[in-house]
Image (spheres, helix red, strand yellow):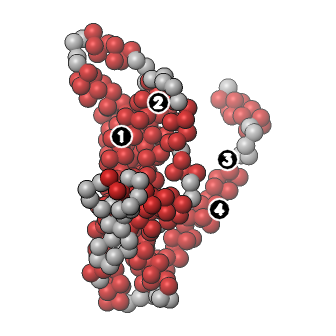
Amino acid sequence: MLPLSRALLRRHSVLPGFDLALGFTLLYLSLIVLLPLSAAFMKTATMTFPAFWDAVMSPRVLASYRLTFSASLAAATLNAIFGLVIAWVLVRYDFPGKRLVDALVDLPFALPTAVAGITLTALYAENGWIGRHLPFKVSFTPLGVFVALLFIGLPFVVRTLQPVLEDLSQEFEEASATLGANRWQTFRLVILPILAPALLTGFALAFARALGEYGSVIFIAGNLPMVSEITPLMIISKLEQYDVAGATAIAVVMLMLSFVMLLVINLLQAWTRKRQGQ
């Protein structure tokens, strides 16, 4: 029966067979992902090691690493916390204007990044609608970078958590309450373990998006050397100086560091699922 069912599946499948589909998949990934990444590594390989070291370890580039990774990590962490709250409210409660709020979550996806950067800069400038009421400066500082990364990363967390919350039955909470658990214990011991893989996925997506963000950050950062320069800006600066090898060297370092951090997050996801017996 099993070979017959497979034959029927192949005969009536809407999509092409496995061999053809796999071939298209590998070809598409090679053209879009693997070849550009390979080109970066090959271009970097043309440099001598001292030249590579000077390009990726200069004080100005190191300062951009610190700002990019620290701001991205902080923004992704805060988005994970408040993204969970927003997703919870959108799934569990009905209120006037719910559809509007739900649509606003996707605004960073639809808004061009340059427009987002100019808008945030105007809002948080010293004479802006928000900035004039703040006792500290936001635009043209590292804090402005953090604000921009918060804006572009929030939808990844909310949209990753929403389907999981929609499938999460309230019976778990009711059973926990009948056993004497308070709200914090129910959230920490019942709900959070179920949401942990999706929450880590949303965090990873927001973090990865923040690492490579350029358009929305470049306006609000101010781009002060050693203060508010992000690593993508350093890559652009190298390209403008026709130092393609230096630009690809920095890009390769960013790629490797990002890969290591995402690998750690994926290992945490796998460990979480194993603990849950999935």
Q: Residues within 10 Å of mark 3 (few under 14, many from 20)?
A: few
Q: Residues within 10 Å of mark 4 (few under 14, many from 20)?
A: few
Q: Quadrant of the C terminus?
A: top left
**The residue tagged with tag 4: helix, strand or loop?**
helix
As measured in the structure, the alpha-carbon distance from the residue carrying label 3 to the one carrying label 1 is: 41 Å
Q: Return the residue nearer the eye: 36 or 90.
A: 90
Mark 3 or mark 2: whose residue is earlier in sequence: 3
x and y percent of residue 98 in the render? Answer: 51, 30
Q: Residues within 10 Å of mark 1 (few under 14, many from 20)?
A: some
Cβ–Cβ below 8 Å for labels 2 and 4?
Answer: no
As measured in the structure, the alpha-carbon distance from the residue carrying label 3 to the one carrying label 2 is: 39 Å
Residue annotated with mark 2: 90
Tell me if I can see residue 81 in this picture: yes
Q: Quadrant of residue 192?
A: top left
Seen at 47% across and 88% down, the residue is 241
Q: Quadrant of the N terminus?
A: top right
Residue annotated with mark 1: 82
Residue annotated with mark 4: 27
As measured in the structure, the alpha-carbon distance from the residue carrying label 2 to the one carrying label 4 is: 39 Å
Residue that lies at the very extreme toward the top in this rendered image:
178
Q: Return the residue nearer the eye: 94 or 214.
A: 94
In the depicted structure, whether residue 193 falls above or below residue 236? above
Residue annotated with mark 3: 18
**What residue type is disc 2 on?**
Leu
As measured in the structure, the alpha-carbon distance from the residue carrying label 4 to the one carrying label 1 is: 39 Å
**What residue type is disc 4 on?**
Leu
**What residue type is disc 1 on?**
Phe
Q: Is residue 3 left or right of residue 160?
A: right
